[in-house]
Image (cartoon, rainbow, N blue to C red):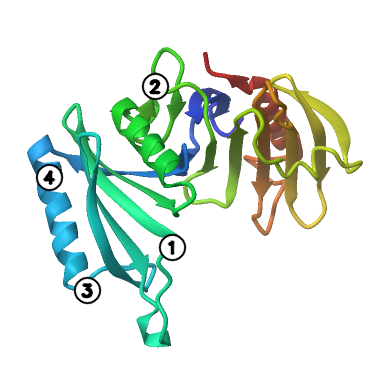
Amino acid sequence: MAETGKTKTHCIGRLLVEVPEEFEVLRHDGTVRETRIERIGPGTERDAERLYEERVRALRNGEVSIDTVKMLYRDVGRIGALRTVSMLIDWTDGGFQPQEPWREETYVSSEGTIFHLETSMDNGNADAARSDIQAVADAIHPRTAGDIPAGEGTCLEHAFLNLPQGRESMGALFRMPGSIVGIEVGLTIVPPGEAKLELEGAESNIGDPIEIAGLRGRVAKDYGSEHFFYATVGQQASQNDFGYSIDLSFFDRRADFGSAPFTRKDADHIWDTLIQSVRIKK
């Protein structure tokens, strides 16, 4: 596979997968309990407090935009020991200003690393959302990319959360450096009794039946305009069981796709190794 034929084990959410060791991680992110997590860098609790105060000041001064969208200061508050600040999308130029949903943020320091936590909430789910962000803050630990912490929990690129399963959505993109050959992994988990997952692909008649990590679905390969392999498996949540959706893909989008070092045989081998390696981290 690739140049050495060796693979490396990666922890993506609650999954362990084998990827060619030369592939680099371009993206590994997602949400845990609907909370988005960003590693800021090294820092103490005092540093986290300073960042929080700077954020509050910037919001009050009208200096915060997110993805070019101006944000409007809403309020400050507390969730347990956490100091939070909330904001709204600024619609005042349009002559109206909705008061929900809003975005609520905090900064925490764990083992010398500062994390920025953010979630969205409205009047209907505010109590549950605040409980979730506090649970994430209490469970977060820094993680060196590539490390696989022991015990139950979920992995992000720079964080590990030793939490029982809850609502989670994770994704990772791996790519051979200097190339457009890569692998994507996605995992979504929903708790018992919650809304249905989108499992149209897994429940369709496209491709061939497959079972991955104990979940059933479909797998297909395209050797036409590129090498593109895709598998989707899952199960809906029931009143007593979690729902899972796993999506895997391999792509070779080079103009000369199928040439060395990723011949059709190599691509098949990488793909077979990937889908056979997927297991739930315990």
Q: Nearer the viewer, residue 122 or 204?
A: 122
Tag 2 residue: 162
**Which residue is rendered at x = 89% and y = 43% of the image?**
206
Residue for point 60% across, 30% down: 191
Q: CA distance from mark 3 to mark 2?
A: 36 Å
Sequence-earlier tag: 1 or 4: 4
Disc nearer the start of the sequence (2/1): 1
- Do residues under tags 2 and 1 come within 8 Å of each other at their CB atoms? no
Give the number of the mark in front: 1 or 4: 1
According to the picture, the residue beneath numbered tag 1 turns out to be 100
Looking at the image, is mark 3 or mark 2 earlier in the sequence? Answer: 3
Indicate which disc, 3 or 1, sits on the residue closer to the N terminus: 3
Q: Nearer the viewer, mark 3 or mark 1?
A: 1
Asked which quadrant contains residue 24, the reply is: top left
| Quarter of the figure that contains the N terminus | top right
What's under tag 2, amino acid-wise? Asn
**What amino acid is at disc 3?**
Gly
CA gap between label 2 and label 4 equals 24 Å
In space, the residues marked 2 and 1 are separated at their CA atoms by: 31 Å
Above or below, 27 against 193 in this view is below
User: In 3D space, how far apart are the residues under numbered discs 1 and 4 (Cα atoms)?
Assistant: 26 Å
Residue under label 4:
49
Q: For the residue carrying disc 3, how many other residues have a C-alpha within 10 Å: few (<14), some (14-19), or many (20+)? A: some
Q: Are marks 2 and 4 in contact (CB under 8 Å)?
A: no
Mark 3 — residue?
A: 62
Please tell me which of labels 2 and 4 falls first in the chain.
4
